[in-house]
Amino acid sequence: MSDFKALLTWFNSKYDFLLWAGPSLLYDQSHEDIINQLRSPNYNSLILKSTMESNCQHPCAFGQFQLVRTQLHLARLAVNPEYRNKGLLKVLIRSLYLEAKQMNKIEEITLFVFRSNTIAFKAYQGLGFKRRSAPKSFVLPEDCEFLVLDNLFDKDWLSVNVSG
């Protein structure tokens, strides 16, 4: 519970929270209500506390995923502001991928990101994510993009033995 509460301190405004959580989590809810929604059985959650790139003992990064057949869908990725620009987004995505890979074969990784979240948008593109039309079953907010990372065998950074 304390890790989730620490996570919620990473967002300084209602707008920052929206960019991270999307429209389904409301900023004005109590921390307990938000935490209960984050613990939804529909998503697996991962909190990074310590990595080779960082020695932080409190949460460094957080992410969630859902498996849809051979697609790994990532959600609510965040890096603690104290540890940004140190490669932890890559470590977080690799960790989520490796955890999901134990459950099922993964052919592609997907996520949604708001275009106005320019730092995250550029970071995902830097890791090789590309824009794609969202599945017709999704109704996206106006400012939202569907990004896909495919050809995973070409992504050396997803390998367990590659650092940074």
Image (cartoon, helix red, strand yellow):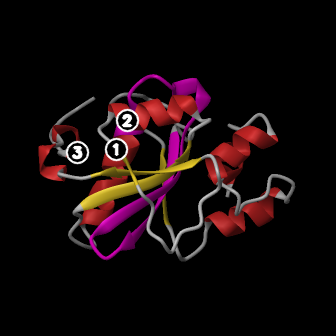
Q: Mark 1 points at which residue?
A: 130
The residue segment tinted magenta is 61-90
Q: Which residue is drawn at 41% across and 28% down?
A: 54
Left or right: 44, with 152 as reference point: right
In percent of width and height, residue 162 lies at 17, 36
The answer to which of marks 1 and 2 sits earlier in the sequence is 2
As shown in the figure, which amino acid type bears the numbered disc 2? Gln
Most foreground residue, 132 or 51: 132
As shown in the figure, which amino acid type bears the numbered disc 3? Leu
**Callout 1–callout 2 Cβ contact below 8 Å:** yes
Q: What element carries label 3?
A: helix
In percent of width and height, residue 101 lies at 25, 64
Q: To which quarter of the image does residue 33 belong?
A: bottom right
As shown in the figure, which amino acid type bears the numbered disc 1? Lys
Badge 1: residue crowd in 10 Å (few <14, some 14–19, many ≥20): some
The disc at residue 67 is none
Q: Quadrant of the C terminus?
A: top left
In percent of width and height, residue 128 lies at 29, 38
* Mark 3 to mark 1 CA distance (whole Å): 16 Å
Q: Name the residue under label 2.
A: 125
For marks 2 and 3, give the one nearer the viewer: 2
The disc at residue 158 is 3
- Could you tell me if residue 79 is visible in this image? yes
Most foreground residue, 46 or 43: 43
Q: Which residue is drawn at 22% across and 63% down?
A: 107
Badge 2: residue crowd in 10 Å (few <14, some 14–19, many ≥20): some
Q: Is mark 1 on a helix, strand or loop?
A: strand
Badge 3: residue crowd in 10 Å (few <14, some 14–19, many ≥20): some
**Callout 2–callout 3 Cβ contact below 8 Å:** no
Most foreground residue, 35 or 120: 120
Q: Which residue is drawn at 23% across and 32% down?
A: 163
* Mark 2 to mark 3 CA distance (whole Å): 15 Å
